[in-house]
Image (spheres, grey):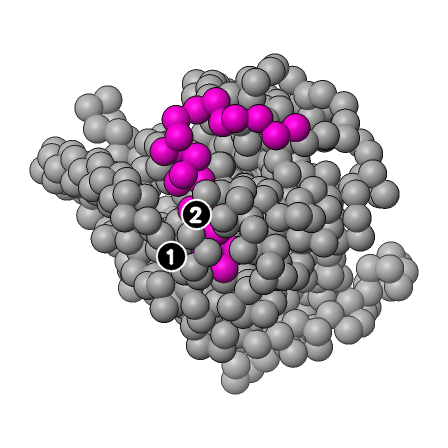
Amino acid sequence: MGGVTEGSSPPTKKTRIERPYQGPAFELHCINSIRALSADMPSAAKSGHPGAPMGCAPLAHLLWGEVMNYSPSKPKWWNRDRFVLSNGHACALQYSMLHLTGYGLSMDDLKQFRQIGSLTPGHPENFVTPGVEVSTGPLGQGISNAVGFAMAERHFASTFNTPDYNVFDHFTYVICGDGCLQEGISSEASSLAGHLGLGRLIVLYDDNKITIDGPTDLSFTEDVGKRYEAYGWDVLTVEDVEDNLQGLREAVEKAKSVTDKPTLIKIRTTIGYGSLNEGTAATHGAPLKSDDLSQAKTIRYGLPDEPFTVAEDVKEFFQKRTKEVESNCAKWEALYEAYKAAHPDKAAELQRRFNHEIPQTALDAIPTFEFGKDKPKASRNYSQACIGTIAPLLPELMGGSADLTPSNLTALACSGDFQKATPQGRYLRFGVREHGMAAICNGLFAYGGIRPFCATFLNFAGYALGSIRLSALSKFGVLYIMTHDSIGLGEDGPTHQPVEMIESLRSMPNVNLFRPADANEMNAAYRIALTRYETPSVICCSRGGLPAIEHS
């Protein structure tokens, strides 16, 4: 029961058979406590999503209670395992775990779930809640951000680790749902992750067979496992986490041992487990009725019918676990001190990069234009010159194009490609995946120590707008280089003419949009973009030549 099997299995309707829990009784007690606490939050707010947290509580308990390395006292610890809740509507689950593990979320904070100004907003927000890595409201974004995390880990490990010091040596874990895997953005990012062989990316797929409209077989009957196998992922199936956690425990350990490809663990869960309406869409997006929540706690969970109550033994378990992971962090800090003594230049470079410090020498190197001496060019050529001069001086500058490198002029002469065999490379071949590209860049920025850039035609910023909006909301200073900015792009026809795109981007809060007219204005655009690290910048560039401006 609850075993792990290789590969995928075709979708089947799950019939719930109540059986005695096969694992330790205390393990079930912890899981049920997480379920109850997560269900209390939507009830107090009179809105929210209790179903997914109740179904995914076993996953969360295993991750925070046994698997992940984290540090509540140092949430930005460089070598922490990254966790992403891609199905962000299940955030009551994440808040429960952050509370239990000591991230500074009090019980009163949980009682303020979904209230204005609280630390527990209706979807995870990285700029509000300590321990939340990325903002994951729109489905599919989180798993795509996680690809950026996994790429960053491989890049830093290959660049800064030495035979004696593994400074970067962690995993990225994701919980996602059916909705995330229906969104096209996740397909774009997951395809690239498989190509790159990101073996430290582990996705726990909450396969509960329910969406808002009802059963997933209304619109989603594909074999997700086979699709991910085709992407180049390792796929495991865990049929049950409600009788015991051993199958999931074994699957996670196997996933950690697979170093040459990412892993999708397809886990059958029951949405709203414990509710009278478990397994149905009724538990997805509305609080449980008071009598239903009462019976879930007392009859199904064996807990008192009291809101926002956690037993002392459960608190003590997670306090003990917190001490263990804090000890791991302290051991890493000791290792890093030895690393600093052995490799002071590398350590200083890491500190500079994670502090968002841009050397003045890099800013001073950005080219300028001298009227009457320099030949006017298309502004994409000015952008190319800026990238060419600053990239050798800013090793954190890392990015690429959506299969338009010769048109966007974004190649890095100072670095090779980031590929499976060459993760030290800084140029990213995103392929024709604009939306996934932008979301991956958000993950790269959120990781820290990287200033990502990505490029496409300005008109196709429309394909990436969801991720650009999250760059702005999350305060991620991603550089968006958008060429072919003119409606004069006539021979390609109206499908390629960015008639409204600049107005659309300018109307978005916390986005700097630049349309430089010459090299001096391009200089200013890059200077501002690099120094305003909490604001994404869109630099619009022309394909055609521009006239010289004398007093620019």
* Amino acid type, mark 2: Leu
Horizontal and vertical percent for residue 219? Answer: 84, 43
Magenta span has 7? no
Question: Disc 2 to disc 1, how far (Cα)?
Answer: 9 Å
Magenta span has 38? yes
In the rendered structure, which segment of residues is drawn in magenta? Answer: 17-40
Residue at image coords 12%, 37%? 334
* Amino acid type, mark 1: Thr
Q: Which mark is residue 303?
A: 2
Residue 131 or 526: which is nearer the viewer? Answer: 131
Q: How many marks are shown on the rendered structure?
A: 2
Vertical order, 362 against 224 (above or below) = below
Q: Name the N-terminal-most of marks 2 and 1.
A: 2
Q: Which mark is residue 73?
A: none
Residue 151 or 425: which is nearer the viewer? Answer: 151
Given this view, does label 2 or label 1 mark the residue nearer the observer? 2
Quick one: SS at disc 1? loop
Residue at image coords 62%, 24%? 239
Q: Which mark is residue 309?
A: 1
Mark 2–mark 1 CB contact (< 8 Å) = yes
Quick one: SS at disc 2? loop
